[in-house]
Amino acid sequence: MGNIDLVDSRLRSFKRGYNTYLKAINQQRVITYLSIVELYYKNPKQISSAKFKDKVQDAFEWIEARREDIFVMNFYAWLKSKIDKKIII
């Protein structure tokens, strides 16, 4: 919404505060997700490119929906809606 400095500041703050902890508890996918969100906010036009879509597809280890955490699914759905330029209701 035009507040890229605020987004950047919050992402950096989160990384500083939680990166080591997330690695310690084996939550690399959170770090990966945040790096993809950061790429999106820094250059929103790239999100619809095939290269970006492939990067997202290859970045995660996909498991069956019934075994996946609902929050993880929600975060991915938000990102997927941005990629596909669709609004989630």
Image (cartoon, grey):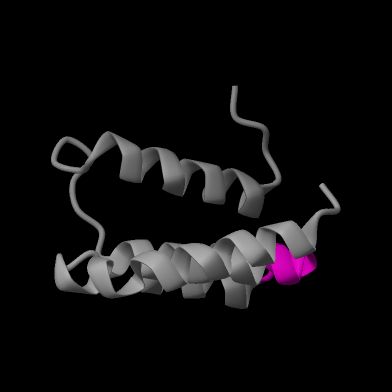
* Apparent side of residue 52 relative to residue 3 in the rendered image (left or right): left
Residue closest to the eye, 68 or 11: 11
Q: Residue furthest top?
A: 89
Q: Determine if residue 58 is in view.
A: yes
Which quarter shows the C terminus? top right
Q: Residue furthest right?
A: 2
Splitting the image into 4 quarters, where does residue 15 fall? Answer: bottom left
- Percent coordinates x, y for residue 31 in the rendering: 38, 69
Q: Residue at x 54, y 49 (%)?
A: 80
Q: Residue at x 63, y 54 (%)?
A: 83
Q: Residue at x 67, y 66 (%)?
A: 8
Splitting the image into 4 quarters, where does residue 86 fall? Answer: top right
* Chief SS of the magenta region: helix
Q: Is residue 72 above or below residue 29?
A: above
Q: Is residue 47 above or below residue 83?
A: below
Q: Determine if residue 56 is in view.
A: no
* Apparent side of residue 1 relative to residue 68 in the rendered image (left or right): right
State the extent of the magenta-drawn residues as a range.
41-49
- Percent coordinates x, y for residue 4 in the rendering: 77, 61
Residue closest to the eye, 6 or 42: 6
* Apparent side of residue 80 relative to residue 33 in the rendered image (left or right): right
* Apparent side of residue 82 relative to residue 21 in the rendered image (left or right): right
Residue closest to the eye, 20 or 68: 20
Residue closest to the eye, 33 or 76: 33
Q: Residue at x 31, y 65 (%)?
A: 29
Splitting the image into 4 quarters, where does residue 72 fall? Answer: top left
Q: Is residue 24 above or below residue 41?
A: below
Residue 28, magenta (yes or no): no
Q: How many marks?
A: 0
